[in-house]
Amino acid sequence: MSAPKVSVIMSVYNGERYLREAVESILNQTFRDLEFIIIDDGSTDGTADVLRSYNDPRIVLLTNTDNIGLTASLNRGLGAARGKYIARMDADDISLPKRLERQIAYLDTHPEVGLLGTWVEVIDEWGERLFTLQGSTDSLRLKWLLLVGQNLLTHSATMYRRSLVERLGGYHPGRYSQDYELWSRMSFETQIAQLPEILLRWRNHSEGISTQHLEQQWETTAQIMQRTHSRMLQRDVSIDKVGQIWALWAMKADRVDFDAIKQTISALDELLTEFGWQYRIAYSEEKNTPMHLRRLRAEALSQAHVNAAFLTGQVGDRFSTWKHVTRAISHCPSCLANSFLILACVEALLGPTVVNVLKQKLIARRKSIDKDRDSLLNPLTLHNHSS
């Protein structure tokens, strides 16, 4: 039997609630030349019954006797895959009908790209739309953001080349952030892209892995960053330093060392410089690469100072806030429109106490407006007014 063009890999553990929607969203894809490898990771609910109810020859069902976790299950699925491309899928998400068709067409015509994501629509547990995630579509920017702990590629929306993931040895045997870890290693080996099209509905609910074990995910991400920074800079980098870079970039006030912000931005600048040198060589065939990298560096340093301005404004350090505001603007004048920078300026002028009072008044006023609007739209109220 000939190998399919793409292998879709999905692991499920006690996921019967959303499983049928997920499975059928793959079976109903417009692209038909696929195998759907599903790993039942030792489920104890009705998952097995749902999976056995399908009689589609494209489904390859693997069953783990014990629950071995997502990472080990995905590696088992990779070991069974025969497709040129690997598409990831989660048991609580929904792939839109043309997802595989669009991603395969892109990878077929862009051999330099090894990892491809798409924009996603975030839905709640009832399938109602919450918002959309429209991450950058620029390969260099996606790689840079991975270095500072920001992963814009939704795991279940990705497709990558099987030859690449096999060469890298599959997923690292960690329990958390397995996608971020693999993307970070891939970023040294291939170009990364993202389709500017919503092709997946990603379900955000309290039972999802991404909403649990946040402390462990934080620690794991810092360890991954430590490895990638050390590889980029070709020397050992302390986990405390990368942790501060991540905390500043993510604006985690409870984790930022305010006394070390200057040193953190200097470390970020060093990382940017090395990043620029390495990718100026790697992307030398693209004539706009040097300009692109200069722009990326300016925006990244400006963003670091914007974040610092916002954080120091929150704790009432007006002198530091203004210092970071001016440096943010000097690096990237167009970043003056950044909403966090505007908030930092307002707080530096008026102080956080005054700003909080204004916020509360605005919230109260908004509630009052909503209440008046609701009363006008209430049929009983309308009837009373008309009488």
Image (tube, rainbow, N blue to C red):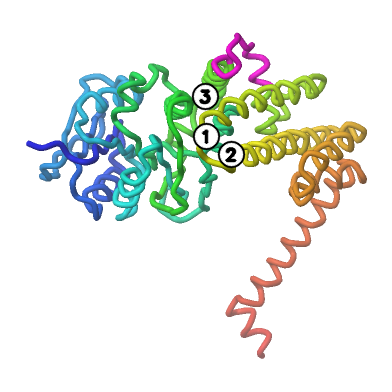
Q: Residue flagged by tag 1: what amino acid is it?
A: Tyr
Look at the numbered discs 1 and 3 and tell me whether their residues touch, using CB distance below 8 Å.
Answer: no
State which tag comes first along the sequence, 2 or 1. 1
Q: CA distance from mark 2 to mark 1?
A: 6 Å
Label 1 Cα crowd, 10 Å radius (few <14 / some 14-19 / many 20+): some
- Amino acid type indicated by mark 3: Gln
Name the side, left or right, on which 346 lies relative to 133. right
Q: Label the magenta part by its dominant secondary structure.
A: helix
Residue 304: x, y in percent?
73, 33
| Image position of 356 with respect to 197: above or below | above
Residue 194: x and y, percent? 46, 44
Spot occupied by residue 270 in the image (x, y as percentages of width and height):
69, 22
Locate the N terminus by quadrant.
top left
What residue does disc 3 label? 217
The answer to if 73 sits in the magenta stretch is no
The answer to whether mark 2 and mark 1 are in CB contact below 8 A is: yes
- Among the 4 quarters of the image, the one containing residue 17: top left
**Residue 311 in view in this figure:** yes
Mark 2 lies on a secondary structure that is helix
Which sits in the foreground, 142 or 61?
A: 142
Q: Quadrant of residue 301?
A: top right
Q: Which residues are magenta?
A: 230-244
Q: Which mark is residue 129?
A: none
Callout 2–callout 3 Cβ contact below 8 Å: no
The residue that appears at 29% across and 35% down in the rendered structure is 86
Q: CA distance from mark 1 to mark 3?
A: 32 Å
Residue found 38% across the figure and 35% down from its top: 114
Mark 1 or mark 3: whose residue is earlier in sequence:
3
Q: Secondary structure at mark 3?
A: helix
Identified at 24% across, 55% down, the residue is 30
Residue pictured at 42% horizontal, 18% vertical: 174
